[in-house]
Image (cartoon, coloured by chain):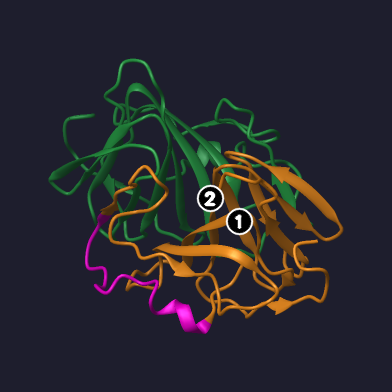
Chain colours: A green, B orange
């Protein structure tokens, strides 16, 4: 789960943070003032992933970024690995995560720690409900490496 | 929202992290294998706050900690300030946050950025439902300073 260079800028609110703020949840898993962005540039190795940047990269001093990812029914993130770690908490619907060679079902509140170098992929095998989760990463991090394999498989 | 020295150790799972893991949400806002701890040492300046450490401080390399805080009906965290920033997303019930001299109601999904040095307090004025939220902080951070004032006021 990493940011493509083409969408990183557009996903950021235009105003830098100078004080505290409350981002209002709108009941439909969007937040007032936060623009939804494509996950990465279009490609064969992911499908149906939307990214919202909720905190970090906007003038704050924090050492992390908080993002909300949503995967449409039938969608999946890239099968990838990197040295930086992920911490994920599920907010919406249900899905699954591949960690190495194992697949774990995920539902509301389940919290995943993805270790450094672990090959991983988030997927939404459902037919109707989006699968949404918070994903926290270090602000300073390496770029992902896409791993060859069956997309979404 | 800071860790009291007396409870920090007990809130950590005993096993260090050597790989990825999935913390299972139990449907009641607890996670298998994660011990609930008192927020801080008992004191007059907070009431009814429980803390769970979901990630960080357990052998990971991440620059942040992810905690789940829950405030019982009628409870409140310390009115305090510190140089480190908070990022909070509400998971359970409803409550409010004081930021400086303003009070903002909070419900599911609302996401709060608490700037450096901002006097703040989280409160649960409800009579029945716990108010629970994720709170992310830098792993390296200063200690809070409690601000004089009416507890919970």
- Viewer-proximal residue among B29 and A123: B29
**Predominant SS of the magenta segment:** loop
* Image mark for residue B87: 1
**Quadrant that contains the C terminus of chain A:** top left
User: Is residue B34 shown above or below A54?
Assistant: below
| Camera-side mark, 1 or 2 | 1
Does A130 sit above or below residue A2?
A: above
Say if the magenta span includes residue B9: yes
| Element under disc 1 | strand
Residue located 58% across and 39% down the image: B109
Residue B149 seen from this side: yes
Residue found at the far top of this picture? A128
Depth check: A85 or B100 in front? B100
Label 2 lies in what chain? A
Read off the magenta span: B5-21
Percent coordinates x, y for residue A141 in the rendering: 44, 60
According to the picture, the residue beneath numbered tag 2 turns out to be: A66
For the residue pair B78 and A5, the one nearer the viewer reads as B78
Looking at the image, do the residues carrying marks 1 and 2 touch, with CB atoms under 8 Å apart? Answer: yes
């Amino acid at each position: 789960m990493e940011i493509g260079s083409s969408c990183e800028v557009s996903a950021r609110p235009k105003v830098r943070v100078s004080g505290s703020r409350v981002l209002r949840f709108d009941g439909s898993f969007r937040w007032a003032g936060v623009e939804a962005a494509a996950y990465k540039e279009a490609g064969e190795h992911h499908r149906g992933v939307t990214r919202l940047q909720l905190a970090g990269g906007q003038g704050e001093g924090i050492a992390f970024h908080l993002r909300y990812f949503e995967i449409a029914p039938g969608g999946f993130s890239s099968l990838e690995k990197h040295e930086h770690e992920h911490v994920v908490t599920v907010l919406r619907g249900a899905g699954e995560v591949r960690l190495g060679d194992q697949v774990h079902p995920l539902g509301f509140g389940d919290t995943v720690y993805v270790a450094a170098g672990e090959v991983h992929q988030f997927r939404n095998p459902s037919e109707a409900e989006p699968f949404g989760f918070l994903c926290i990463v270090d602000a300073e991090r390496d770029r992902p490496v896409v791993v060859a394999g069956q997309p979404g498989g």
